[in-house]
Image (cartoon, rainbow, N blue to C red):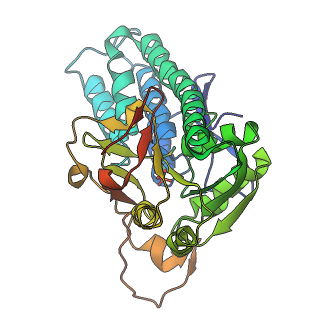
């Protein structure tokens, strides 16, 4: 089943806030509901956000023209309707700031607006299909690299957040590599970090690994660097929300601590992401906007308050791993060694 798709004039997506308890598919046919779904992480993960952005523009482009504004076709520029479309596209583009794929997906589809709704939809479906192909390619390339460098024995992989099919369309990025290893019989075990505050590792990665039939254990985020220091982990695999031109990589908060732990322990630290996550317009990590999701997710866990009333909190959703801590970046086209 696809995480996100287009079906009869609307976007269908798995509501990831309800996993692992129930698998509910949302049908979304207006941009406000889509923006809300993106912001509350019903759809999440950089590649899936790219597809959501592109399909969201298709929704906007397909909107029926306002009465009296002429029949069909894109609204003439300068009209109130054309301006409303542009405003909606900009709101969608900015719904989450760190993952460059969202803005990229929006831009791919928006570039086709002059061609009318069918052209926009074709472009959006191309973003979806390219993501599916890219994830297959990353899985193969990543598994090849690991098996070449670590040898044929089954590997133990550590990962953070969710980078599986739920973060893309069908297969994932870092977890796509894990899936390919597993299919080749080359996976011993995955150590999945739970990923506070929203628990994408505990809720989503374990759900996907169980469905794959892949051996895994869940570990607290703060146990990651210690477990690396004890030996027995062959590689850390993470995804990326934005890779700056120099290789600095923004990904889920906790990635940087893992990279430091991996360097100290001599464990390869691999980033797996499609080429579309590389942002040549951002020279280095300090220029990447890091989403702050506010204190609510820190002082409470799944709606249950864990800190005293009135506690202040900081909630950066992502961190930046400097390129010199990254062993390799595996994309759908190549392996980049940032150092
Ligand atoms: O806040 P999220 O759940 O959207 O964060 C997702 C991540 O950090 C992923 O690691 C990243 O988007 C790569 S997904 C293949």
Side of 24 where 176 appears, left or right: left
Tell me if residue 256 comes above or below residue 23 in the rendering: below
Quarter the C terminus occupies: top left
- Seen at 39% across and 31% down, the residue is 276
Side of 64 where 221 appears, left or right: right
Q: Quadrant of residue 207?
A: bottom right
Side of 176 where 58 appears, left or right: left
- Seen at 48% across and 70% down, the residue is 297
The residue at the far right in this view is 213
- Seen at 56% across and 32% down, the residue is 135
- Seen at 56% across and 27% down, the residue is 137
Is residue 261 visible to the viewer in this orientation of the structure?
A: yes
Instruction: Give the mark count.
Output: 0
Quarter the N terminus occupies: top right
Side of 78 where 60 appears, left or right: right
Tell me if residue 106 comes above or below residue 230 in the rendering: above
Is residue 94 visible to the viewer in this orientation of the structure?
A: no
The residue at the far bottom in this view is 308
Q: Quadrant of residue 220?
A: bottom right
Residue 330 rendering spot, x and y as whole percentages: 46, 37
Tell me if residue 21 comes above or below residue 69 in the rendering: below
> 74 and 321: which one is in front?
321
Q: Quadrant of residue 171?
A: top right
Residue 138 rendering spot, x and y as whole percentages: 54, 33
> 244 and 165: which one is in front?
244
Residue 202 rendering spot, x and y as whole percentages: 64, 63
Residue 278 rendering spot, x and y as whole percentages: 34, 36
């Amino acid at each position: 089943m696809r995480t996100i798709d287009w079906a009869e004039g609307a976007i269908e997506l798995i509501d990831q806030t309800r996993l692992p308890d129930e698998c509910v598919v949302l049908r979304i046919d207006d941009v406000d509901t889509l923006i809300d779904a993106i912001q509350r992480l019903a759809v999440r993960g950089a590649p899936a956000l790219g597809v959501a952005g592109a399909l969201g523009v298709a929704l906007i482009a397909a909107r029926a023209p306002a009465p009296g504004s002429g029949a069909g076709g894109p609204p003439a520029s300068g009209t109130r309707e054309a301006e409303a479309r542009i405003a909606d596209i900009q709101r969608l583009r900015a719904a989450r700031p760190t993952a460059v794929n969202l803005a990229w997906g929006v831009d791919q589809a928006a570039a086709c607006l002059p061609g009318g709704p069918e052209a926009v939809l074709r472009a959006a479906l191309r973003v979806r299909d390219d993501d599916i192909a890219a994830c297959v390619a990353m899985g193969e390339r990543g598994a090849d690299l690991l098996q070449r460098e670590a040898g044929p024995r089954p590997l133990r992989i550590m990962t953070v957040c969710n980078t599986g099919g739920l973060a893309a369309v069908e297969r994932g990025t870092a977890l796509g590599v894990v899936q390919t290893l597993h299919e080749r019989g080359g996976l011993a075990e995955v150590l999945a970090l739970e990923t506070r505050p929203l628990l994408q590792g505990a809720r989503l990665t374990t759900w996907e690994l169980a469905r794959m039939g892949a051996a895994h254990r869940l570990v607290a985020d703060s146990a990651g660097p210690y477990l690396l220091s004890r030996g027995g982990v062959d590689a850390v695999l993470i995804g990326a929300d934005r890779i700056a031109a120099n290789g600095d990589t923004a990904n889920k908060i906790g990635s940087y601590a893992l990279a430091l732990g991996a360097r100290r322990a001599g464990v390869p630290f691999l980033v797996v992401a499609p080429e579309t996550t590389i942002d040549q317009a951002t020279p280095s990590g300090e220029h990447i906007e890091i989403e702050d999701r506010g204190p609510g997710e820190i002082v409470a866990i799944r709606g249950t308050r864990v800190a005293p009333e009135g506690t202040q909190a900081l909630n950066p959703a992502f961190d930046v791993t400097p390129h010199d801590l990254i062993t390799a970046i595996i994309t759908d086209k190549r392996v980049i060694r940032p150092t």
